[in-house]
Amino acid sequence: MYKYDEIDQTNIDERVAQYRDQVRRYLAGELTEDEFRPLRLRNGLYIQRHAPMFRIAVPYGLLASRQLRKLGDIAKRYDRGYGHFTTRHNMQMNWPKLEDTPDMLAELATVQMHCIQTSGNDVRNISTDQFAGIAPDEVVDPRPVAEIIRQWSTFHPEFTYLPRKFKIAVSGTKTDRAVVQVHDIGLEFYKDDEGKTAIRVWVGGGLGRTPILGQVVREHLEWQHILTYCEAIIRIYNMYGRRDNSFKARIKILVKALGIDEFRRQVEEEWAHLKDSPNTITQAEFDRVAKYFDPKPYETLPAHDASFDSAVASNPAFANWVKRCIHPHRVPGYRAVTLSLKPHGKPTGDITSEQMYAVADMADKYSFGELRVSHEQNLVLADVKLSDLFALWQEARKHGVATPNIGLLTDIICCPGGDFCSLANAKSIPIAEAIQMQFDNLDYLHDIGEIDLNISGCMNACGHHHVGHIGILGVDKDGSEWYQVSIGGDQGNNTTLGTVIGPSFAAEEMPGVVQRLIEVYLRERTPEERFIDTVRRIGVAPFKEHVYSKAEERETANV
Amino acid sequence: MSNLIRNNAIVADEWTVVNLAPAAEEAVRKQAGKVVLFKLTGEPAATADQIANTEIPASGKIIVPLPVWAARKDELADRLAKGELGVWLAPHEIVENLVKEAADLNQFPIIAVFHERHGDGRPYSMAFLLRTRYGFKNELRVFGDVLQDHLFFYKRCGFDSYLIRAGRSAEEALAALNIFSTPYQGSVDEDRPVWRRVNRG
């Protein structure tokens, strides 16, 4: 993974010093609340329901074991011994003291970590695919470009006070796992007709209260021009994006207002001034960054391993885990492993300091000391030998990170919700937990098969509810918490926004509602169909009918 | 004591900012029940009455609002010839409108941008455009809600003159001009990104 040189280190050290002074001035009354807010937000510090929330950047989801250990230490020393992984690779801590945050930042800097631009109206963490570099369907490793964009966007003098937050995703695979169509800018690598690497540039996607899928602003861009092209897009946005209403300030609203053709015309006109300017990426700089992402020193291994095969054959629990948590790898004899942070009945994406230490040890022992954070809020060990999988499973199980539910109903994407977040309309964690307990039967879960269930506690959509096969949104009605349900959303190459099925439900109804949606699916599905396929084939109506039917009608129907 | 930083030093301020005459009726946009202070980029900055009623001091160095310059050029020609006239833009004014009104920007010894609220990022792009696209070489000043934590960004985007908000120390702000020593990206003050300046191995 990328390692800091002196320049990178100097930048984050100077940031620690700057932030320390800003906190000092705030506490001394030299900065007003209003002046301090944008400064602390640019360093990931929110003032939340219980305490400040501190959001730590995990650039494009890549972590070294020593960094995870440091996060474990920080959580223990300054927080309550756990952290929470978000849908954008970052880690949040929910209980730090404001006065401690400069020291936390200084600690992070010792392991090349920071909180720069993890909130605020600026360019946020660049996100990508958790299987970058090892996915068999990869066209280009997106990480070097993601790192180059990270550096370019860090303390960007012109683009640190945008109308609203700005999220960039880079996808390097045929099957999009970085959800480029719901980002402000999505960069999608592909091979053009001549076999050359090209980038399709998507713009104006986003969830939130106005979910819109991105549109293609440029079909074919060469990688050298990524920074200048982003500069053109963001300058147009910075100048003309709305600033009078924060709900209408994302770039998607500007793109929609102008229309993609007019927006493209303006961007291209701006870019004509910037093309080939000094921010054009040189081959030397690309190579310098790319070498940090060279393939690991893999052993030459056979494609099969007898001990692994026999463990799968003789141990059904292990076989279940293999079925759900193991992913293909481009090198024979290796697999990627997802460690589930979704044990049933616990907040999704949460991890204790002890678990962080244990996972760091597993990464050292089995996966070259590195791991990734997935946008589904799980952890991934990307380079595990087949012959090590059984031993890894045993350790993972001991530490509660081996729930074999990846891709299944209980692998819920969920924001922190009203328990923690001051923006939320409703709680989301207890809903996720209740649904997990409702379906706490592995055979049943496996029978239901692959399904994405996403929960957001408000329309800001941090839980990406619009693109869940089942999406749940917390809404506020007359001061009480209700939940709106949509189905048919999807992410990936066929990104689709879900359809709301009808009036919202009370919290205690939610496990039953999901149960009834699943009942319709089990009744209607063809043998090879996933939940989303059935919804697409038969439409929303049968689901709606069953969910809203009276209990007695349902019983008759089920006879 | 002066609150003006020019380049890297605190200096006396020779310029007086001329404000537009107040509008006959306060134009406020209401949205979701609260008063919104922002104007969208491209909105007209002033009415004909405001422009006509704006009082221009008879002597001294003055910076006038763009709409006043545009409408009252003849009256101001002498001052410009004497090097006593600059113009200022509000965040929602379009740099191209200034360029339309003045073929050569360098006839102005100073152009200023009013940073109405520190969270508004438009002035940074305005400075970038004035310096790079339109080749403005003289003093480029920011005034208004100007705070030390923004100076580094102003400087990088091409401002070289900063009127620190009243009540804040310009002395303290000076240090903030160089808070980061090795910025990554190219901008106005240094157009080469770090990898073109330094051999990173």
Image: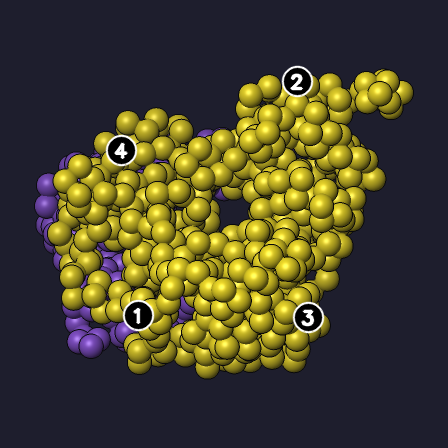
For the residues labelled 1 and 3, the Cα–Cα distance comes to: 33 Å
Q: Amino acid at mark 4?
A: Arg
Image depth: mark 3 or mark 4 in front: 3
Image depth: mark 4 or mark 2 in front: 2
**Does residue A373 appear to the left or right of A423 in the view shown?**
left
For the residues labelled 2 and 1, the Cα–Cα distance comes to: 51 Å
For the residues labelled 4 and 1, the Cα–Cα distance comes to: 35 Å
Colour mode? Answer: by chain
Residue A264 - label = 4
Q: Which image quadrant: the C terminus of chain B? A: bottom left
Determine the secondary structure under disc 4.
helix
Residue A292 - label = 1
Q: Amino acid at mark 3?
A: Lys
Pointers 1 and 3 in contact (C-beta within 8 Å): no
**Does residue A171 appear to the left or right of A279 in the view shown?**
right
Determine the secondary structure under disc 1.
helix
Q: Residue at x 35, y 48 (%)?
A: A137
Q: Residue at x 67, y 58 (%)?
A: A317
Towards the viewer: B52 or A430: A430
- Residue corresponding to mark 3: A398
- Residue corresponding to mark 2: A541
Choose top left, top right, bottom left or bottom right for residue B149: bottom left
Pointers 2 and 3 in contact (C-beta within 8 Å): no
